[in-house]
Amino acid sequence: MPEDVDPRTIDIPFSVPFVHRLRFTDDVLGDDQDMLLNVLEPSGDQLPRVQFWLDECVADAVPELRSRVEAFCQLNADRFLTPGNIQTVPGGEVVKNEIHILERMLKCINHADLDRRSYIVVIGGGAVLDAVGFAAAIAHRGIRLVRLPTTTLAQADSGVGVKSAVNLFEKKNWVGSFAVPWAVINDAKLLATLPDRDFVCGFSEAVKVSLLKEPELFDDLCRNADLIKNRDADITEPIIRRSAVHHLNHITKGGDPFEALEARPLDYGHWSAHKLEVMTNFGLRHGEAVGIGVAVDTVYSSLVHGLPESDADRVLNCLAEMGLPLDHPALHETDELFAGLEEFRQHLGGRLTITMLEAVGKPIDVHKIDESSMRRAIEIVASFASKNCSSTFSTEAARS
């Protein structure tokens, strides 16, 4: 041992091998069911135990979904065991806001005698994936989780991530964990009945990741914004795939999958988005809040960090042409909104680190925000929205 090494101190860096499995299917409960079956690996000579969880909003919108899951289980009874009934949880942010729902999920997992080699298959939007995923992450310190996202936002962004959480103390994702899902299956059929408002929401995250990672993708989004709004599958499906792969590559190759460093580049535009969701009692969808946040931070980048004004204009036009709202009365309650900066800092720890843009495809990290310039950015976005956006929110609906 070298003489300058204190024998009382032992520091050994190590890494844990993970595999992130991402699949794309057209009908995962039908012709493509082998994609799901093949990730449900047996444990030795024992059949795996598999518990299914459904988003109630999705189950209500697609009445045949429950029967399709039941038929899938019956048809493949020789491949896995399904203890108990198919479970359901409320959809939307409700599932993350009510902490007693988490306790109920854990009771169901315990009653089904699931273990670390069992599987929880969750079918739902991003909030349900988050909440059920957190229950799976803390039961037995981790049960294998298979996500089947049912929204464009979850398929393009959050469903591919390695985070799960619920809300507490009126703060987004305050209680949560990092946990790599066993598999993520992006199924096109699960998007078919998604309402138009929710369908377009996912593409705010695609705009975000394109601004950070791929100028060519941003060009495609700008060129095809109207086709995205009108749900042209030939355009939307490849964009969802490209966005998901960018997120997957960032997580697996970016060097900071569990956000141990200062920056959270994939949260571009999110410091205000998370606060806007809380300020509106989640009347704003996450994708809508992200669209507003991306618009504001992009304009701020043009005012303060040298992003060409023409690129900021392109971002605003792209988001508006997709049909995303770019203003909300809560956005103008700036004293409360700017408290989101400190909450964003606390969530990660250390000094404030916000991602901004010097150019499309060239993000930078900044450690302070000029509030007067940020207010000016908000004014510019709001003025643009009043002239160009069909989706607006009334003052009366601001906190509904």
Image (cartoon, helix red, strand yellow):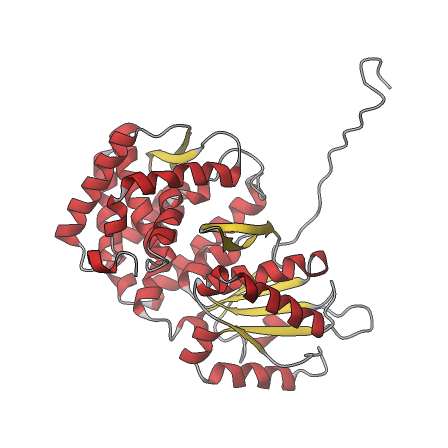
> Left of 209 or right of it: where is 51?
right
Q: How many marks?
A: 0
Name which quarter of the figure residue 147 lies in. bottom right
Q: Nearer the viewer, residue 285 or 110?
A: 110
Can the viewer see residue 327 in this picture? Answer: no
Residue drawn at point x = 62 percent, y = 63 percent: 145
Q: Nearer the viewer, residue 209 or 377?
A: 377
Quarter in which the C terminus is drawn:
bottom left
Can the viewer see residue 177 in this picture? Answer: yes
Quarter in which the N terminus is drawn:
top right
Q: Residue 120: x and y, percent?
A: 63, 68
Q: Residue furthest left?
A: 387
In the image, residue 241 sits, relative to residue 257, either above or below, namely: below
Q: Residue 231: x and y, percent?
A: 31, 67
> Left of 288 or right of it: where is 148?
right
> Left of 209 or right of it: where is 247?
right
Residue drawn at point x = 46 percent, y = 55 percent: 157
Residue drawn at point x = 78 percent, y = 68 percent: 43
> Left of 234 or right of it: where is 13?
right
In the image, residue 339 sits, relative to residue 143, either above or below, namely: above
Name which quarter of the figure residue 13 lies in. top right
In the image, residue 123 sits, relative to residue 82, either above or below, namely: above
Residue drawn at point x = 43 percent, y = 36 percent: 342
Q: Residue 152: x and y, percent?
A: 41, 63
Q: Nearer the viewer, residue 341 or 355?
A: 341
Q: Residue 53: x and y, percent?
A: 57, 72
